[in-house]
Image: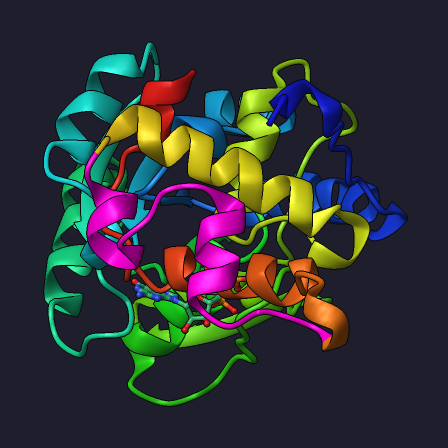
Amino acid sequence: MDANKIHINWFPGHMAQTLKMIDGELKICDAIVYVVDARCPQSCINPQFDDFVGRKPVLFVLNKIDLASNGAKEQFVQSLQLKTPYMVITRNSVKSGGTEAVVKALQKLLAERIQAKMAHGIVKTLRVAVIGVTNCGKSTFINNMTNKGKTQTGNRPGVTRTKQWVPITDNLWLLDTPGTLWPAFTNQQVARNLAYVGSINDDILDIVALSQALLDDLNKLQPDAVKARFGVTTFEEIAKKRGCILRGGVLDTRRAAKMILAEFREGKIGKFNLDNLL
Ligand SMILES: Nc1nc2c(ncn2[C@@H]2O[C@H](COP(=O)(O)OP(=O)(O)OP(=O)(O)O)[C@@H](O)[C@H]2O)c(=O)[nH]1
Ligand SMILES: [Mg+2]
């Protein structure tokens, strides 16, 4: 499979509007929670957010850490070149508990700001914007912090469509924002990584070509993983082995592609760091 045959771009109009909205809301925010998918955190860095990151302290959350390979955080930290204050934590937002660690990290990140306010007798509610690419788990992260399903979540990109302030405690409010990508991917491997993890709408993709490219990439990263899962390694072999066959013996390539992508996204093929493909 020649991965260059797939060209990916997805920047619907509502994403441009979201960028404008975040820009406005940041004026009243104390910090940013920048959620990235721990399976490809570097690929989740949105050039359109560079200006936002420079304006406020940032807490990077490597979410979906349960699906990521070891060392994801260390590798991501090494890739960061920020001059403004930031911290990096990992998170599994579908597992309960651990919310205190997030609050503590924010308090540490904003310690100077909080102290300065308190010195003036102001006990201020911290307002924090939660931003990130589509489907990285922003809304799930926020729900997990409240223990109540306050925001809508879903296993497809583009679930959140409007901003929503969610009170976590009396002193902390989080802003849920719709996921945002950028107008053009200069590196198509970044685009493929985002597509593999489900951050790009499958409906605009050639999912057969995408799943074939995924298998090639997984075989590059961990030569034994695909074989261990399916017993075979190529797309055709997997499709046959799993009975994805139409009448007349023709391969049901769409069904096979959907199955391979779903099993990868659920972590059934293994834990990978897709950024190693960049
Ligand atoms: N395994 C795992 N799944 C997660 C985690 N966080 C979120 N998810 C799942 O990822 C999917 C997307 O979650 P959302 O919270 O809707 O993602 P979002 O970033 O708000 O997406 P948009 O609103 O579309 O930008 C859902 O199926 C969640 O259950 C996590 O830490 N681990
Ligand atoms: Mg959402």
- The number of callouts visible is 0
Q: Nearer the viewer, residue 189 or 79?
A: 189
> Residue pushed farthest bottom?
148
Say left or right for 141 vs 197. Answer: left
Name above or below for residue 147 compared with residue 167.
Answer: below
For ligand 2, the image quadrant comes to bottom right
Q: Indicate the quadrant containing the N terminus: top left, top right, bottom left or bottom right.
A: top right
At 21% from the left edge and 14% from the top edge, which residue is drawn?
A: 78
- Say which residue appears at 67% left-offset and 49% top-offset: 208
Is residue 161 among the parts visible in the rendering? yes
| Residue 205 screen position, x and y as percent | 75, 47
The magenta stretch spans which residues?
Answer: 224-246
Q: Is residue 180 above or below residue 41?
A: below
The answer to whether residue 194 is magenta is no
Give the percent coordinates (x, y) of residue 74: 13, 26
Q: Give the residue displayed 76% in from the left and 27% down from the top.
A: 7
Horizontal and vertical percent position of residue 116: 24, 38
Q: Magenta stretch: residue 241 in it?
A: yes
Which image quadrant: the C terminus?
A: top left
Task: Name the side, left or right, on which 256 lies relative to 225.
Answer: right
